[in-house]
Amino acid sequence: MTDDLAALQHEAEHSIAAAPDLRALEAVRVALLGKAGRLTARLKALGGLPAEARREEGARLNVVKEALAAALAARRVALEGAALEARLAGERIDVTLPARPSESGVIHPISRSMDEIAALFGAMGFSVAEGPDIETDWHNFGALNIPPHHPARADHDTFYLPPETAEAPPPVLRTHTSPVQVRTMLSAPPPIHIIAMGRTYRADHDATHSPMFHQCEGLVIDRAITLGHLKGCLSDFLRAFFGLPDLPVRFRASYFPFTEPSMEVDIGWNRRTGELGRGGDWLEILGSGMVHAKVLANAGIDPREWQGFAFGMGIERITMLKHGISDLRPFFESDLRWLRHYGFSPLAPAMLHEGV
């Protein structure tokens, strides 16, 4: 190897090692191996040499070219790694820093009541059934023996959706969770012991009514079911839910199209103070009754063989009574102060009342 080629290689390797970044390294590469590079010029000059000298000089130049290419590649890898490390260091987030102080979350009173309801009826052997919020006219009204002239079918009382065809009745946002009872009876043979909880919709809005609210309904279908079973079930539930073992419970004759006989359920309270179980006054709390024979037949169940009872209650209503909440609207206003006052710790699960 000639001295000047060795000097060129030494100088080039020094320049490559001294390149501070990728841009400088690229400049070194172009100066050596570009179209007008120093080593490229030496390679182009081989054509003017005799054959024997051309072979020897070409071999030496190729050795130097491969050595410089390897040095360039190694330096590029090193510079790219350094650039990545610098970028990561600049964008690093110290995850060990303490979090910003914030209030811990709480369970909404409605969710808490639903958990308690499920726990209490679950201890009595009920399972939880679910259904869609958008229902057919038949599931929401027809199957439940609700005639066309019933006020719940009026546009000003119920939310209707556009029908799929001009002849088809329009779908409806369910006005109660009773369609879940119908779907359960159609999908599963008796005996049936279920509760259905969820959102329902009616065109009301004031301090005691909301366009969207929550209901819990129960259904029992079995042989030899009587009013005594209904009264015992609801009395035990109400006394456990409100935590009053001696809570007065009264069943009063009423009318619903889907039960016969039908009964309103009242609990004792004090009209002046609002205290439950005291004062000698009565407060209507929910509706109930024996499932109408037409409803059983509509669901394909023989009413001569099977009997049952059903009940329904507003979850907001019993929650307001239990916790002394006088206005329904704050349930849906997402006021954190209100939620912190009436909410429940996520670490405090709903517990069954002693004796249920």
Image: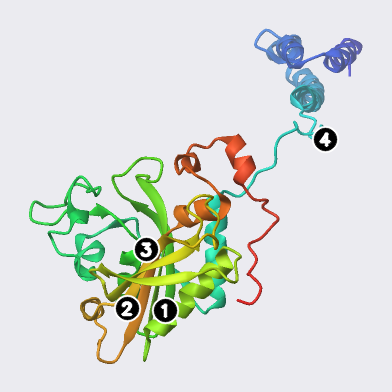
User: Marks 3 and 1, Cα distance to the nearest angstrom?
Assistant: 24 Å
Quarter of the image that includes the N terminus: top right
Q: Nearer the viewer, mark 4 or mark 1?
A: 1
User: Marks 2 and 4, Cα distance to the nearest angstrom?
Assistant: 62 Å
Q: Residues within 10 Å of mark 4 (few under 14, many from 20)?
A: few
At 35% from the left and 82% from the top, the residue drawn is 308
Q: Amino acid at mark 4?
A: Thr
* Left or right: 53 as drawn, with respect to 217: right
Q: Earlier in the sequence, mark 2 or mark 1?
A: 1
Q: Amino acid at mark 2?
A: Met
Q: Earlier in the sequence, mark 3 or mark 4?
A: 4
User: Marks 3 and 2, Cα distance to the nearest angstrom?
Assistant: 22 Å
At 57% from the left and 51% from the top, the residue drawn is 323
Residue position for label 4? 96
Q: Earlier in the sequence, mark 3 or mark 2?
A: 3
Q: Is residue 328 above or below residue 348?
A: above
User: Marks 2 and 1, Cα distance to the nearest angstrom?
Assistant: 8 Å
Q: Nearer the viewer, residue 82 or 158?
A: 158
* Left or right: 184 as drawn, with respect to 237: left
In this rendering, the count of numbered labels is 4
Residue 216 horizontal/vertical position (percent)? 43, 63
Q: Amino acid at mark 3?
A: Gly
Q: Nearer the viewer, residue 150 or 90?
A: 150
Residue 300 horizontal/vertical position (percent)? 24, 82
Residue position for label 3? 131
Residue 222 in sight from this viewpoint? yes
- Give the SS element for disc 4: loop
Residue position for label 1? 230
Quarter of the image that includes the C terminus: bottom right
